[in-house]
Image (cartoon, rainbow, N blue to C red):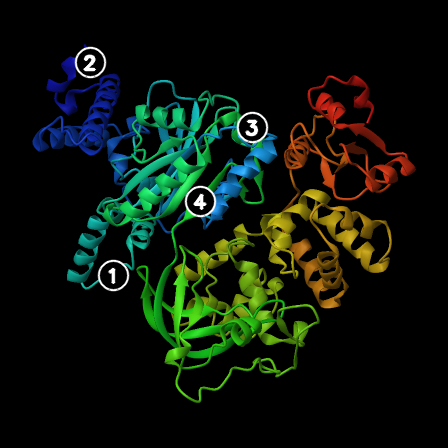
Amino acid sequence: MAKNDLRGVAVDELTPPDAAVELEILAAEIAAADAAYYQDDAPSLSDAAYDALRQRNEAIETLFPKLIRKDSPSKRVGAGVAAGFGKVQHCLPMLSLGNAFSDEDVAEFYDRIRRFLSLPANDAVDIVVEPKIDGLSISLRYEDGVLVRGATRGDGREGEDVTANIRTMDEIPQKISGNVPAVLEVRGEVFMSKADFLSLNQRQEDAGAKLFANPRNAAAGSLRQKDPAVTASRPLKIFVYAWGDVSGVDALGYGGDVDWPDQGTFYERLKAWGFPVNPYAKVCITLDETLALYQKLGADRATLDYDIDGVVYKVNRLDWQERLGFVSRAPRWAIAHKFPAEKAETILNDIVIQVGRTGALTPVAELEPVNVGGVVVSRATLHNEDEVVTRLDARVGDRVIIERAGDVIPKIVEVLKEKRTEGAASWAPPSVCPCPLKTTTVRPEGEAVRRCSGGMECPYQQVARLKHFVSRDALDIEGFGSRTIEAFWEEGVLKTPVDIFLLEEKDGTIDPKLEEREGWGDTSANNLFESIRRRRTTDLGRFIYALGIRQVGLTTARDLARAYGSVDVWMRQMIAIVEDPLGEAFQDLSDIDGIGPAVVADIVAFFGNPESRADLDQLASMLEINPVEQASNDTVISGKVIVFTGNMEAMGRSEAKAKAETMGAKVSGSVSKKTDLVIAGPGAGSKRKKAEELGVSVISEQEWLDLLSNKNDQLRLL
């Protein structure tokens, strides 16, 4: 029977082979109708004809459930309420962008690119300019052209599986065709238009439901509904602008089936596949042209039907993107140029003190609530006591100007002293910690921050450490809100991170049990226990960061993880430093590029504390901490310790360092007997001399380039 003869056959008369053919035809026709309606604003079918296709598709799937396709139109709504969202590990991280706040910052962005790539100062650098959508970042994975998964950005490395909800969005194609890689992950921003946001809030108000603060919150809340039918009822949109995992790409996302030569060509490819691309996206040739488009977008911002909070610049050429690579959590080849911050005037009602996990005392402004850029703000950071006393001279009762730029924490930028009440008292930093111990505070010489002297005994520091340990960038244990941590600490249920992993075991001995507490139940208790169980396996970088060692942020934690590879090696080497402060282990830690004496001192202090060591030993025995996967293990410099000194003229110091790290080398900032190779450019001085004294191999930059291209076989003896 021919394919086009099946439409007149009753569903209950179809054979399984015929039903499979019919479902294929229906999926294609409904997808085409969706594209015509939602992307081209040119409906190809009447409502009745469209509904008939949907109904026939549903009837066939009901009779032949085993034949339901991955790209089935019925999956666009989903069929059940999920208990929660599964986790998705991104094959390539979804990184954030560095920020520019002025024209000078953008000019420096251009200059950095030229310096890194060793380009002449007057060489053109083509930049793609596009609006920065204020929405929710999303990843869409296609296999053989069929949408198989949608995931949120999450922490950049792990997001939430929202596939069922993504399928409800008509702007997202369920199937793509043409020159499509076998695996194609595209990335974009889900948002809600201003008009749709207002309509949604009106419906919420009519129903007596909670109103959304702004379109971004509405989009995020709509996409993360446990019931896909709720998401389906919300008018979500998307702009796609990047790729992630593609068949055969390398660790930076290049190579393999990525056959587009530049960002602009990729956008044309996206349009051909049926993805919405922002119409403002444009390739600019000069800095002046780039800044002119930024100004235009800023002027048009109020007239757009969606929120933008800046403009994104990306190097157009993919070969340059690949060379530039990434630094920390952001690409070197892209930057976000933010619009001027939103400001508002309000009253400073009080200045309170927050105690952080390292004992830092941070003054926080309690404000008369005020709307700033669509968000009601009632608190703002004051950074440190010099900010309050010296720069601002802020006093309780003052009228102040607060500023909020994008997602940045609000801050006070000006005190309106001409409106100050006569006799307002100056603020003085506290001499004692507000914690129950009332320990004295100290401000070490040369530091801007005052600290509690109570150390590990300070209750506020203990609570702050617990909050940090479960936070998103640390172990990311869902279910532990700030109030839950505080309540569990006050009751003695949690005192150290070790107690978190004993919580389920101890639950039967706790009165009341978790599920019997106010606001809890069997489902929420089981969800928390399951979240804790999942986090018994983590990676080394996350684990080191979660420990809350002073000055060890995300970047430093990952540097340590790469340098030592496994938790056993890291702990053994750190303990060796405590036992022999001037030994070889100390030198190895000091040699890690980017880790200075102050960071070394704080790490050593952490390991020198018996209580910290005891907790760390117990955690290491309770958790499965995955070792770090090396960038490459089959190159001539894999595992070698390399030092660059002097001027790198062909590719620049930064590019040379980045290239070495991607090939599995460890780049150090100083020469020692553990150094395997020194690359010395013009002007090399003391480091080259020390290498020669130690008998370490020293090569020129040209020999380094030959090494990278495997032209110098003798260097394989390294």
Q: Amino acid at mark 2?
A: Lys
Mark 3 vs mark 4, CA separation in Å: 25 Å
Q: Are marks 1 and 2 in contact (CB under 8 Å)?
A: no
Q: Disc 1 marks which residue?
A: 211
Mark 2 crowdedness (10 Å alpha carbons): few <14, some 14-19, many ≥20: few
Q: Disc 4 marks which residue?
A: 336
Q: Is residue 54 visible?
A: yes
Q: Earlier in the sequence, mark 3 or mark 1?
A: 1
Classify residue 286 by image quadrant.
Answer: top left
Q: In what element is the residue under mark 2?
A: helix
- Say how many tags the image has: 4
Residue drawn where x is 30% and y is 45% of the image: 191
Q: Nearer the viewer, mark 2 or mark 4?
A: 4
Mark 2 vs mark 4, CA separation in Å: 51 Å
Q: Earlier in the sequence, mark 2 or mark 3?
A: 2
Q: Nearer the viewer, mark 1 or mark 2?
A: 1
Classify residue 149 by image quadrant.
Answer: top left
Q: Is residue 505 visible?
A: no
Q: Residue 347 versus residue 527: which sits nearer the camera?
A: 347
Q: Nearer the viewer, mark 4 or mark 1?
A: 4
Q: Earlier in the sequence, mark 1 or mark 2?
A: 2
